[in-house]
Image (tube, grey):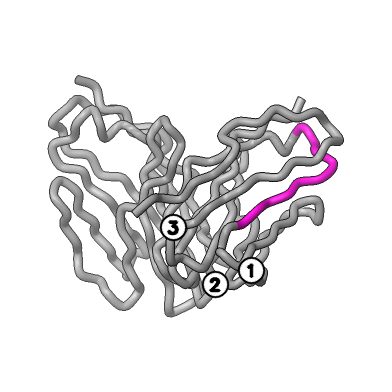
């Protein structure tokens, strides 16, 4: 079975721009969660989608948004980029969310200049 | 609110040594799940184990073993006969209730020298 895939793997953007990251979960998995990893804050939960609905949300500003499609693929969007948004963005998929094991993709490294 | 503390930040051992990574958690929920993940230099988080709050049995998987003690709110991870390939950052994490939000510790960087 193929693992979680994320595209692109690397991105360089300028302050003020917006960016869209993509995540394809493991086949059969219906829950997709997004995490931000930075050296200062560590790993922080952004949000979770299940069956095209946002089910949980972390403490991030409204500039961070996401969506999930009927095939469970998910996208994450960050608008009006700030330097502090530079991070590794990780996507995780699980069968049903909740306490299920979450399997992570390789991440997208976003650099904001 | 829940919290995971990994007090050790960096550990360096010589190959074949045993090493224990500590994890202490805080939660008021009686139902929760604990996890360990490994993050090699490639960046991908690799799932290692999940343990629920009602199962205090220790678990062994090859060179890996986990010790869960509710009395001390700890879920420690031991690698026996460490190998260079074990070099990575190891994260302990917690989920409470029915939500999917993993609360992670800060991670422990393990370096295994040949």
Q: Secondary structure at mark 1?
A: strand
Q: Is residue B36 above or below residue A48?
A: above
State the image coordinates of residue B89 (x, y, percent, origin top left).
Answer: 39, 37
Give me the residue at 48% from left, 59% from top: A93
Query: Which image quarter is the N terminus of chain B in?
Result: bottom right
Label 3 to label 1, Cα distance in Å?
20 Å
Disc 1 + disc 2, Cβ < 8 Å: yes
Protein chain holding label 1: A
As drawn, is B19 to the left or to the right of A109? left
Residue labelled with disc 1: A56
Q: Secondary structure at mark 2?
A: loop
Give me the residue at 49% from left, 53% from top: B104
State the image coordinates of residue B33 (x, y, percent, origin top left).
Answer: 40, 68
Question: Viewer-nearest of labels 3 and 1?
Answer: 3
Residue numbers of the magenta segment:
A74-83
State the image coordinates of residue B48 (x, y, percent, origin top left).
Answer: 31, 53
As drawn, is B104 to the left or to the right of A51? left
């Amino acid at each position: 079975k193929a693992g979680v895939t994320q595209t692109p793997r690397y991105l360089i953007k300028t302050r003020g721009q917006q960016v869209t990251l993509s995540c394809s979960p493991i086949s059969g998995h219906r829950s997709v969660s997004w995490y931000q990893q930075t050296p200062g804050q560590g790993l922080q939960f952004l949000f979770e989608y299940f069956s095209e609905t946002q089910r949980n949300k972390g403490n991030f500003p409204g500039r961070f948004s996401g969506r999930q499609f009927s095939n469970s693929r998910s996208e994450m969007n960050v608008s009006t980029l700030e330097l502090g948004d530079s991070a590794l963005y990780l996507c995780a998929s699980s069968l049903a969310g909740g306490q299920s094991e979450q399997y992570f993709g390789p991440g997208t490294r976003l650099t904001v200049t | 609110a829940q919290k995971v503390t990994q007090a050790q930040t960096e550990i360096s051992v010589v190959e074949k040594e045993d090493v224990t990574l500590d994890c202490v958690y805080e939660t008021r929920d009686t139902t929760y799940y604990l996890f360990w993940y490994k993050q090699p230099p490639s960046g991908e988080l690799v799932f290692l184990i999940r343990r629920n709050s009602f199962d205090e049995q220790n678990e062994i998987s090859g060179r890996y073993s986990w010790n869960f003690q509710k009395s001390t709110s700890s879920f420690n991870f031991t690698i026996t006969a460490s190998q260079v390939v074990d070099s990575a950052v190891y994260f302990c994490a917690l989920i409470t209730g029915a939500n999917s939000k993993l609360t992670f510790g800060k991670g422990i960087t393990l370096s295994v020298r040949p």
